[in-house]
Image (cartoon, helix red, strand yellow):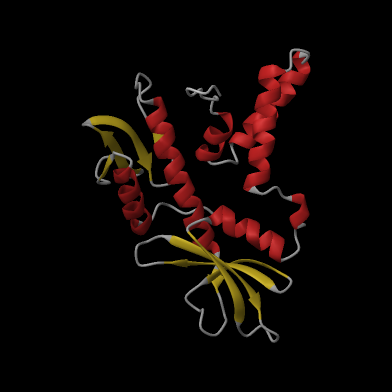
């Protein structure tokens, strides 16, 4: 179930948008009951957001990348809030301020809304009578990291089927190298290789890609 943007989510979005250089103004419902927020950068209006998270913008607005950045931020935060609000309270001693996101076997994924309005995630193992939990892996606001850990810990996914960041970095560098240097690549093979590169890029931090694709530098002794 999807929820309208709550006051807590509004405050969190405004704070994170401010760090990115935006100002966000709350709108009154007097003229448009669905309208909730308007975002600006340097006095220029970027876009508006409805209570559901839907975005509005002028067709002639040039701020395409800014709109994408703000919309992505809001949807990411809203996904976590929807997960949390749809979950039931965790009925285990000492952790009843958490909510149960998912469980499989003896493992579970839970979340808690902190005083700063962030949703924080953890994976646990149930104890022998399922009245408590143990062996917590805490992921703070990293939902994707917590979800991945839950699927591995619970046995839903074999860890050997996953690549580590280091392994993906090696694969990325190898694919980029082949794309630059293999003159025998066919058009179809080049398209397939580019698709793999883009998929790796979406799963790797920028620093890893920059390190592996930086051009070699010469010094006074050569390369």
Q: Residue at x 51, y 56 (%)?
A: 142
Residue at x-position 71% and y-position 60%: 152
Question: Which residue occupies the foreground of this view, 172 or 154?
Answer: 172
The answer to whether residue 194 of the structure is visible from this angle is: no
Q: Position of residue 2 (x, y in %)?
A: 51, 52
Give the quadrant of residue 25. top left
Quarter of the image for residue 172 reads top right
Task: Count the numbered circles shown.
Answer: 0
Q: Give x and y (percent) for residue 30.
A: 24, 44
Q: 209 above or below 6?
A: above
- Coordinates of residue 18 in the picture (x, y in percent): 29, 44
Percent coordinates x, y for residue 116 in the rendering: 34, 63
Q: Which residue is located at x 37 percent, y 61 percent?
A: 117
Q: Quadrant of the N terminus?
A: bottom right
Q: Is residue 221 visible?
A: yes
Is residue 3 shown left or right of residue 18?
Answer: right
Q: Residue at x 63, y 30 (%)?
A: 198
């Amino acid at each position: 179930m999807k929820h309208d943007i709550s006051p807590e989510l509004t405050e969190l979005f405004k704070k994170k948008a401010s760090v990115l250089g935006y100002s966000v103004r709350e709108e009154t419902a007097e003229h448009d009951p669905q309208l909730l927020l308007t975002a600006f950068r340097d006095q220029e209006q970027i876009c508006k957001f409805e209570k559901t998270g839907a975005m509005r913008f002028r067709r002639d607005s040039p701020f395409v990348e800014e709109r994408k950045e703000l919309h992505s931020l809001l949807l990411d935060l809203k996904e976590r809030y929807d997960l949390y609000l749809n979950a039931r309270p965790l009925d285990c001693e000492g952790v009843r301020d958490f909510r149960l996101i998912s469980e499989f076997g003896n493992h579970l994924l839970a979340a808690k809304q902190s005083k700063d309005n962030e949703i924080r995630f953890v994976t646990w193992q149930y104890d022998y009578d399922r009245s408590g939990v143990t062996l917590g892996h805490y992921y703070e606001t990293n939902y994707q990291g917590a979800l991945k850990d839950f699927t591995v810990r619970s046995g839903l996914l074999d860890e050997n089927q996953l690549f580590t960041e280091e392994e993906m970095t090696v694969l990325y560098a190898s694919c980029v190298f082949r794309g630059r240097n293999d003159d025998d690549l066919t058009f179809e093979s080049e398209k397939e290789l580019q698709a793999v590169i883009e998929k790796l890029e979406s799963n790797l931090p920028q620093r890893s890609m920059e390190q592996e694709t930086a051009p070699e530098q010469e010094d006074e002794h050569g390369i």
